[in-house]
Image (cartoon, rainbow, N blue to C red):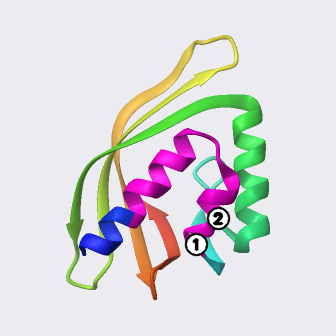
Amino acid sequence: MPGDTELLVHLYDRFNARDMEAVLATMHPDVVWANGLEGGHVYGHDGVRDYWTRQWATMDSHAEPAGFSTGADGTIDVEVHLTARDLKGNVLFDNMGHHIFRIENGLIRCFDIR
C-alpha cells in the first residue's frame, strides 16, 4: 500500500491546489467517480473534469486525509476531514468522512463516499 498511499496523498494535494491535470493523471481514463453533490457517479476524465469544474465554481472545498487503511477487498479507505465554504466564505460543512478508492495498475479506478 505505500505506493497507493503516496498516490492518494498526491491526489489530495493536487485537488486542494485545484490542479485538475495532475488530479486526472492519478486516474484511469475510465474512472468511476462518486458525485457527492447530486448522487450517483460520473465517468471518465471528462466526467470528473466537468464535475469538479462545476463544484469549484460554487464552493471552496478542501479535503485533508487523516488516515489510510486497506479493506479485505483491497480497497483503500481514507478517513478525511472535509470542509467547504460558499463563495462568500460561509461554512457549508466541516466534518469527517470516508473516501473509498480502488486502485488498479497505479491508477484510481473507482472512488466512492461512505
Who's the residue at 60% across and 12% down the image? Answer: 89
Secondary structure mostly seen in the magenta stretch: helix
- Amino acid type indicated by mark 1: Met
Element type at marker 2?
A: helix
Residue 78 in sight from this viewpoint? yes
- Amino acid type indicated by mark 2: Leu
On the image, the x and y values in percent for residue 19 come to: 65, 47
On the image, the x and y values in percent for residue 25 come to: 62, 68
The reply to whether callout 1 and callout 2 are in contact (CB within 8 Å) is: yes
Residue 23 is covered by the magenta coloring = yes
Who's the residue at 68% across and 11% down the image? Answer: 88
Q: Quadrant of residue 1?
A: bottom left
19 is higher (above) or lower (below) than 48: above
Residue carrying label 1: 27
- Residue 24: mark in rendering: 2
Task: Write down the region rendered in magenta.
Answer: 7-27
